[in-house]
Image (tube, rainbow, N blue to C red):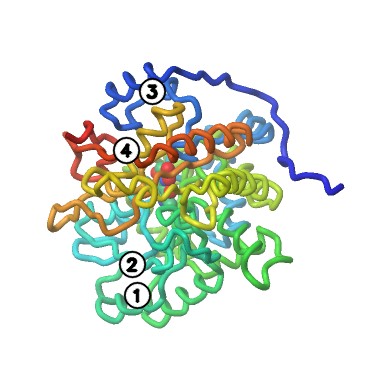
């Protein structure tokens, strides 16, 4: 008999979970103004809000913490981190930051100005926020295939090269750089193919532009290239990473994802002029060049995390768990962005809560129902997260309306995923009775989803 697949690690430390009653959860939802970001973590049974900073570190990472060098300037842990990043990406210049959005803030402060246009594939909300905050525009050039959640294509995160060409032909002088997010979080954790990265590079060269990779989940992207793209099946993840980054000029990184740490990030680039420009902002915003917002010990743990997470077995374990949940949902007929992505399952609320009008935010409604059902916290990646159009101030209903179930790395077991699937099934079975959603009673101007206050629609 062929042996079944199992995790490439075993568990050394555990943390108790607490379940709750439906009545308790009703009250907690009211207290949180129906915004799951406002729920205390303690009131959540299985937390799939994000895979960002919520994973478990390995014994080797914990050991590295003890060896961290806390020197203000010239920390040994910085040099170890920098060497690891250079080895994996080929980038020589590295600036640590306290997380991914801080890397965006520092680099974009140097590069983005009013009226600029930054084309890319479904910019993440903080990325879009940092562009729009500077009165510039983020133009989404994701392939249209990403919008059809039931279409099974291997690289739904790709940049549509002809859309990108149109932007460059029309407005090249306003484009400070192109940004490619690997994997494409907003489109469903969907990967970008090596071929597409190569084409973006070619087009960028034609117009004399530089390319940044928003690399939060670069290792998962490399895994999909290895398992889905011709010619890469015999390459190691590290070889694939080196080739991917050879098509970029720089990266911003949220190390809280594929760096396997709870906090941290960095900028890396091959260009000294960008490094020099970013230096001017990292010191006032983050800290000195050799720590930039991170503890020495955290840089030490990150170096180990990057090393571990660019190994095939680690990635296979992770993606296997996402696929496990996907297969259960297939059994129950629940629609999600297909094929299953790298870090999460994205439920397609527009196909599930078909009786809830878009003005009442179906994905947010589904997020609330799932919490009500079983204390499972997902996250709306939909019309609330999309914010309002900066010019018209209208809600943006043009994109997708997903509930993201992001799976933390090395944290939950497949049994937890079976509970998640069963809870979704229960909500799915009563989907036709759910006819009303929520209305906004208070919202922030940018990145409203974190703090928005909602009430049941009347
Ligand atoms: N880029 C991408 C693609 C991201 O997914 C995130 C964060 C960031 C940048 C910003 O990084 O959080 O370290 O400041 N994504 C988290 C998420 C929050 O839940 O997807 P950060």
Query: Disc 1, ligand 1: is the CB inside 8 Å?
Result: no
Q: Which residue: 70% across, 26% down?
A: 12
Number of marks present in the image shown: 4
Q: Around disc 1, counting alpha carbons within 10 Å, would you say few (fewer than 14), some (14 to 19), or many (20 or more)?
A: some
Image disc number at residue 163: 1
Residue projecting furthest to the left: 392
Q: Nearer the viewer, residue 293 or 69?
A: 293
Q: Secondary structure at mark 4?
A: loop
Up/down of 194 relative to 319, above or below: below
User: Which dot, 2 or 4, sits closer to the camera?
Assistant: 4
First of labels 4, 1 by sequence position = 1
Q: Which residue: 58% across, 62% down?
A: 90
Q: Which residue is mark 2?
A: 119
Q: Around disc 2, counting alpha carbons within 10 Å, would you say few (fewer than 14), some (14 to 19), or many (20 or more)?
A: many
- Image location (x, y in percent) of residue 179: 39, 63
First of labels 1, 2 by sequence position = 2
Give the position of the C terminus as an image quadrant.
Answer: top left
First of labels 3, 1 by sequence position = 3
Q: Which residue: 31% across, 57% down?
A: 399
Q: Secondary structure at mark 1?
A: helix
Q: Which residue is mark 4?
A: 434
Disc 4 and disc 1 in contact, CB within 8 angstroms: no
Image disc number at residue 40: 3
């Amino acid at each position: 008999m062929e042996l079944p697949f199992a995790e490439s690690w075993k568990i050394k430390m555990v943390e108790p979970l607490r379940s709750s009653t439906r009545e308790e959860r009703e009250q907690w939802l009211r207290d949180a103004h129906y915004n799951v970001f406002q729920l205390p973590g303690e009131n959540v049974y299985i937390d799939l809000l994000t895979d960002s900073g919520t994973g478990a570190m390995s014994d080797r990472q914990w050991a590295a913490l003890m060896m961290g060098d806390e020197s203000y300037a010239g920390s040994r842990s910085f040099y170890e981190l920098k060497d690891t990043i250079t080895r994996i990406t080929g980038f020589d210049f590295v600036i640590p930051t306290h997380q991914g959005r801080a890397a965006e803030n520092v680099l974009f402060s140097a590069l983005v100005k009013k009226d600029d246009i930054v084309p890319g594939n479904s910019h993440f909300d903080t990325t879009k926020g940092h562009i729009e905050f500077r009165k510039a525009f983020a133009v989404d050039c994701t392939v249209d295939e990403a919008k059809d959640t039931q279409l099974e294509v291997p690289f739904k995160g790709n940049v549509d090269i002809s859309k990108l060409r149109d932007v460059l032909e029309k407005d090249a002088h306003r484009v400070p750089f192109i940004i490619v997010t690997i994997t494409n979080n907003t489109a469903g954790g969907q990967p970008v193919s090596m071929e597409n990265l190569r084409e973006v590079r070619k087009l960028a060269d034609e117009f004399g532009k530089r390319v940044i990779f928003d690399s939060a989940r670069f290792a998962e992207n490399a895994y999909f290239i290895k398992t889905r793209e011709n010619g890469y099946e015999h390459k190691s993840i590290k070889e694939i990473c080196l080739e991917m980054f050879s098509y970029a000029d720089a990266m911003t990184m949220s190390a809280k994802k594929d760096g396997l740490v709870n906090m941290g990030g960095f900028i890396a680039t091959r260009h000294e002029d960008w490094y020099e420009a970013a230096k001017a902002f990292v010191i006032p915003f983050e800290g000195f060049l050799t720590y930039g917002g991170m503890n020495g010990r955290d840089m030490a743990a990150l170096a180990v995390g990057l090393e571990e997470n660019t190994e095939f077995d680690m990635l296979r374990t992770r993606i296997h768990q996402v696929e496990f949940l996907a297969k259960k949902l297939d059994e129950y007929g629940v629609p999600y962005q297909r094929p299953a992505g790298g870090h999460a399952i994205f439920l397609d609320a527009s196909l599930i809560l078909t009786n809830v009008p878009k003005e009442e935010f179906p994905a947010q409604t589904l997020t609330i129902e799932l919490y009500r059902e079983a204390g499972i916290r997902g996250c709306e990646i939909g019309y609330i997260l999309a914010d309002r159009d900066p010019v018209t101030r209208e809600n943006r209903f043009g994109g997708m309306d997903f509930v993201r179930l992001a799976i933390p790395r090395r944290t939950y077991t497949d049994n937890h995923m079976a509970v998640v699937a069963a809870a979704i099934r229960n909500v799915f079975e009563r989907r036709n009775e759910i006819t009303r959603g929520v209305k906004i009673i208070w919202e922030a101007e940018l990145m409203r989803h974190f703090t928005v206050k909602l009430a049941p629609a009347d």
